Image (cartoon, grey):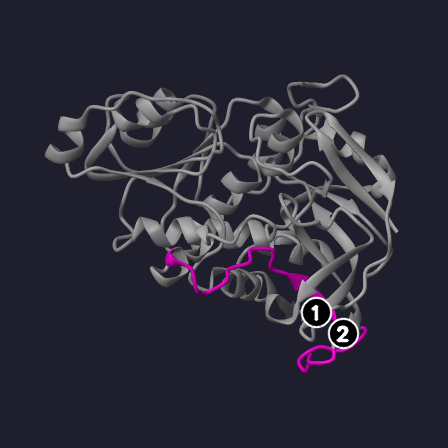
């Protein structure tokens, strides 16, 4: 079968590898339909997020059809359409025992697309407990957003939202920014969005919740929303990693800044303000507290318009063009500005529907 292998920074290629087989009783081999390109994949390829083990198959936002089942599998059968939760946790280490399953100490060797062969491949070896059967009306493409949405719900949970009349912002209108905007909207919070890239702006402006507004400048947004560029806000989700200091200085007492950008960037914060104004600076990653199951249910029930957020789908052989669409030029070994309106870009591994 074919798989997209990470060899080293800027060195990825489709290789022929051995087909997969069930080994353990709870193993399930899934024929992959589609798999989404994540910022993690881009970070691995470019070296800005150097976490992947060389030789690993990339990809973790995926759906497919069950092809084989282990001897102990009872909840799935061959032919079932499924979405795959790629976030393994052992349940026994100190992190799992303290409720931080997303930081399981057994991640090395189990993290899909990082240290365990992922789903930019024709097949993926999953565990029964990490699959959800798709409802007939849910497309493979929409369901592939379950994993990024589950990460979004983990972050929203951490914000502990108790009031809906708060001033809120989301920085960045990429896939995570759009998912956060919609997830906050579902909680009754209508945040405004900040995005500078004109191609992101073009896509986002047509796919926002009707009650939310989009701006290209934070100061302008504060004036338009609240009448003063010195106005304070209660909550900001920064998916860019670029606005920590700016947003921090504009947090109202009790304000919260959630950073979900995996960027090698440092910021200076006033410790006195953190205490004196009861501020919270929070990080979030991966799925936690049943967020994967909740995310799928929101897509299934059309609470989140996942289909609308899929902007392009490329055939597997066109993976370089797919990555180029999100600004990762593999051939030239450089990152480039986005030149096409887009949000979530998928690779199609097969014609499975």
Residue 53 vs residue 47, the one in the foreground: 53
Q: Quadrant of the C terminus?
A: bottom right
Asked if the residues shown at circle 1 and circle 2 are in contact, with their CB atoms under 8 angstroms apart, the answer is yes
Q: Is residue 92 magenta?
A: yes
Q: Is residue 62 shown left or right of residue 268?
A: right
The answer to whether residue 114 is seen in the rendering is yes
Assign the magenta stretch its main secondary structure. Answer: loop
Q: Is residue 225 magenta?
A: no
> What label does residue 71 carry, if any?
none
Horizontal and vertical percent for residue 343?
Answer: 63, 38
Horizontal and vertical percent for residue 92?
Answer: 43, 64
Compared with 172, 329 (above or below) is above
Secondary structure found at label 1: strand
Residue 222 vs residue 140, the one in the foreground: 140
Compared with 213, 220 (above or below) is above
> What label does residue 69 carry, if any?
2
Q: Residue at x 33, y 31 (%)?
A: 225
Residue 81 vs residue 210, the one in the foreground: 81
Horizontal and vertical percent for residue 188?
Answer: 36, 54
Horizontal and vertical percent for residue 175?
Answer: 57, 40
Determine the CA span between mark 1 and mark 2: 6 Å
Secondary structure found at label 2: strand
> What label does residue 27 carry, if any?
1
The answer to whether residue 139 is seen in the rendering is no
């Amino acid at each position: 079968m074919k798989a997209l292998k990470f060899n080293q920074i800027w060195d990825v290629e489709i290789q022929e590898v051995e087909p997969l087989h069930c080994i353990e009783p709870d193993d399930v081999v899934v024929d992959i339909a589609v798999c989404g390109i994540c910022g993690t994949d881009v970070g691995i390829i470019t070296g800005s997020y150097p976490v992947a083990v060389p030789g690993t198959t990339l990809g973790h936002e995926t759906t497919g059809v069950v092809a084989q089942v282990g001897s102990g599998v009872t909840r799935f059968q061959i032919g079932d359409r499924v979405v795959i939760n790629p976030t393994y946790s052992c349940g026994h280490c100190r992190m799992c025992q303290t409720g931080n399953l997303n930081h399981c100490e057994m991640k090395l060797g189990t993290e899909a697309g990082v240290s365990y062969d992922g789903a930019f491949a024709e097949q993926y070896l999953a565990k029964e407990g990490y699959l959800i059967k798709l409802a007939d009306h849910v497309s493979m493409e929409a369901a592939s957003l379950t994993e990024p949405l589950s990460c979004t719900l983990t972050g929203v949970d951490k914000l502990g939202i108790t009031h809906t009349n708060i001033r809120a912002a989301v920085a960045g209108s990429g896939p995570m920014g759009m998912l956060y905007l919609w997830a906050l909207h579902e909680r009754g919070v209508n945040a405004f969005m900040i995005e500078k890239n004109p191609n992101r702006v073009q896509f986002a402006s047509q796919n926002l919740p009707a009650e939310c507004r989009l701006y290209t400048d934070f100061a302008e947004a504060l004036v338009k929303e609240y009448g003063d560029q010195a106005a304070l806000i209660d909550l900001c989700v920064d998916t860019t990693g670029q606005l920590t200091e700016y947003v921090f200085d504009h947090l109202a007492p009790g304000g919260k800044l959630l950073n979900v950008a995996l960027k090698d960037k440092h910021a200076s914060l006033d410790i006195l303000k953190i205490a004196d104004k009861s501020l919270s600076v929070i990080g979030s990653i991966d799925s936690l507290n049943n967020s994967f199951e909740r995310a799928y249910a929101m897509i299934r029930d059309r609470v989140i318009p996942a289909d609308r957020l899929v902007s392009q789908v490329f055939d597997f052989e066109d993976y370089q063009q797919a990555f180029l669409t999100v600004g990762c030029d593999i051939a030239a070994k450089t990152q480039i500005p986005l030149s096409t309106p887009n949000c979530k870009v998928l690779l199609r591994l097969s014609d499975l529907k």
